[in-house]
Image (cartoon, coloured by chain):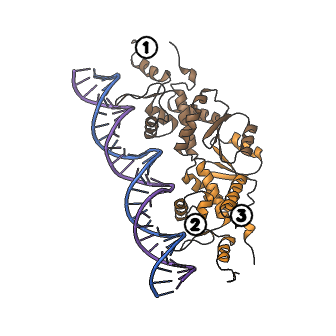
Chain colours: A brown, B orange, C blue, D purple
Amino acid sequence: MHWTGDGSRVVVMTQQVQGGFSGKKTAEIVGISYRQLDYWARTDLVRPSLVDAAGSGSRRSYSYQDLLELKVIKTLLDAGIRLETVRDIFGYLRNELDEDVASANLVISGTTSVLVRSGEEIIDLIQGGQGVLNVLPLAGVKQGLDAAIVELFPTVEPGADAAVGG
Amino acid sequence: MHWTGDGSRVVVMTQQVQGGFSGKKTAEIVGISYRQLDYWARTDLVRPSLVDAAGSGSRRSYSYQDLLELKVIKTLLDAGIRLETVRDIFGYLRNELDEDVASANLVISGTTSVLVRSGEEIIDLIQGGQGVLNVLPLAGVKQGLDAAIVELFPTVEPGADAAVGG
DNA sequence: CGGCGGAACTACGTCGATGTGGTTGCATGC
DNA sequence: GCATGCAACCACATCGACGTAGTTCCGCCG
C-alpha cells in the first residue's frame, strides 16, 4: 500500500505509477480535447478501465491500454474516418487489442476489422475486397504514444510493466 | 441528328446517348439521395461537367466521368470517411482521374492521395507511413457503376464510347 | 397560350460531435 | 472543518451534412 511516511511524493507516485492517468493528462497525452475525452466516455466509446466517473467531483482514471485505444481512435479520426464508424469497429475489436500489438496492422473493411501481420495478406485483401481498406500500422501508434508520455510526464514509464509492487 | 419520325423514343435516346445523365438518374445510379447530389453540386464537390444548373427550372447534365467520380465518393463515404476529407482529396486528385482507371488503386494518406498499380508499392507505403492508409481498387468501382447503369437504364451503354454519331 | 410535370431553388429542421461557460461536489491544504 | 482547486456535470451554442416541404421556373403538350 502507501505509507504515510513520505507524504506528497508518494501520493503523486501512486497516482501515476499505478497506471492511472487522469482525464486531463490523458487528453493531453493522446492529443485530443478534454471535451472529446469526456464525450467519448459518456457515449460509451472509451470508458476509463481503472476508475470510472461517479458523479460530479469524482475522477476518472485511464489505463495505458486505454491510452493506446484512444490514440488509435485519434489516428483514425485524423485520417478522416467518422466517429460512428470508429464506434462500430471498436465494438468488434475491443477484445483483440490486448495482444502484443507491437508489429501488427489494423485493417478495416467497411464495418469489420482484422489484425494482420504480413504485408502479403494485406495485398490479398486488397485484391479480393471491392470496398475501401483502411490500414493502420499499430507499431507507429504505440511509438507515438510512448514518446508523448515521456515528453509530457517523464516521471512515469510508458510500458504496461510500469505497474510496480512495493 | 434526331428525326421527327419516331417521336418519343428518339427524344429519350438523345437525352441518354449524349452521355448526359439527369440529376435524378445520376442519384439513382450512383446510389445517393438527390439531396446529396444537389448539395454536392452547390458546395462545389462535383458539378455536372456537361450542363450546369442555371436557375430554377434548368436541368443539370452529368457525364459518365462524373458518375465515376460520384461513385468513388460514395464508396469513400460508405467506408466511413468524412466528406470534408473527401473534399481535400478530390481537390488534389481531380486532374488524374481521367486516366485509364481500370486497374489502379487509389491510396490516400491523410490529405494527400496517389494512384498506384502494383501491390508491392502499397506495402512500401504501409511500411513507411505512420498514419492510416486508405486503399480503394478503382476497378471494382467502375464495375459496380456499369452494373448499376445497365440494370437501371439498359438503353444506354455504360462506357465513354457510348457517345455515338448518327 | 395556358396548363402540367419535373427539377432546381429556398427555407427550415435535425442530428452528431463537439466548443463554451457555468455549476456542483470530492479531496486535499491549511 | 473550511476554503479552494480541479474535474465531472449540465445547459446551451455551433457547424457540417443533409432531410422535408414548399416555391419557382423551364420545356413540352395539347
Asked if badge 3 and badge 1 are on a common chain, one would say no
> Distance of mark 3 from mark 2, alpha carbons?
17 Å
Q: What residue is at 67 percent from the left and 33 percent from the top?
A: A104
SS at badge 1: loop
Q: What residue type is labelled 1?
A: His
Q: Mark 3: few, some, or many residues within 10 Å (few <14, many ≥20)?
A: many
Of pointers 3 and 2, the one earlier in the residue sequence: 2
Instruction: Give coordinates of residue A98: x percent, y percent.
Output: 59, 27
Task: Please indicate whether residue A108 sits to the left or right of residue B35 in the image.
Answer: right
Q: In which quarter of the image is residue A105?
A: top right
Q: How many labels does the image show?
A: 3
Q: Mark 1 points at which residue?
A: A2
Instruction: Give coordinates of residue B127: x percent, y percent.
Output: 70, 39
Q: What residue is at 64 percent from the left and 57 percent from the top?
A: B71
Whether residue D19 is situated above or below residue A135 in the rendered picture = below
Q: Quadrant of residue A128?
A: top right
The subunit carrying tag 1 is A
Give the label on residue B23, or none. Answer: 2
